Image (spheres, rainbow, N blue to C red):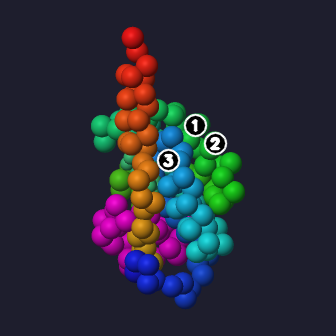
Amino acid sequence: MGGSEWCQLVRYNVVLTYGTFDLFHVGHLRLLRRLSDLGDKLIVACSTDEFNLGKGKVTAIPFEHRVEVLEGCRYVDQVIPERTWEQKRDDVQAYGVDLFAIGDDWAGKFDFLGDLCDVLYLPRTENVSTTELKDLIQRMRASESP
Ligand code: CTP
């Protein structure tokens, strides 16, 4: 499923997504809003600092604060930690997930969950990302320095 022609025929009970959500931005907000519209409960698995470091990714905002921001978001019902790549099948079963959904930068990567739940890739919001925000901040600091 995916694309702008997709229309919702099913309302899900539990929707699950994964992500870092560092420097929370409007792309994150729009994704979470769309996901919460798809079901009754939205669970976000937020990747820990250690898991990110293992991927060579350094977060600007520590895990506990990223969790706090997500928990404060009206579209999110529950936040759990993402500690490993392998936990997804266990999470889907443990939390009774019937839709796994994530941005389409991951298109096809999680199709292996398709025997347990529906899998959906949503279009990303254009022209915003944590990486771009970090680059922008660096450029602003560089232009300010004497
Ligand atoms: N996302 C989105 N639109 C954006 C940016 C992110 O829909 N413009 C979605 C991603 O597809 C993912 C979730 O938000 O499902 C969390 O993405 P994350 O990797 O934390 O954010 P990015 O801004 O993509 O971070 P980075 O630049 O570090 O990859």
Which quadrant of the figure has residue 55? top left
Quarter of the figure with the C terminus: top left
Q: Which-is-in-front pick, marks 2 and 3?
A: 3
Given residues 40 and 80, the one toward you in this image is 40
Question: Residue 18: x percent and y percent?
Answer: 46, 56
Task: Check whether the beta carbons of the residues at disc 2 and disc 1 lie within 8 A of each other.
Answer: yes
Residue 8: x percent and y percent?
A: 54, 84
Most distant residue in the top direction? 146
Asked if residue 112 lies in the magenta stretch, the reply is: yes
Q: Any atom of ligand 1 within 8 Å of the CB at mark 1?
A: no
Pointer 3 residue Cβ closer than 8 Å to ligand 1: yes
Residue with the most extreme bottom position: 9
Q: Which contiguous range is marked in magenta?
A: 91-117
Q: Secondary structure at mark 1?
A: helix
Q: Give me the residue at 44% from left, 50% from top.
A: 128
Pick whichever of labels 2 and 3 is earlier in the sequence: 3
The tag on residue 21 is 3
Label 2, on which residue?
68
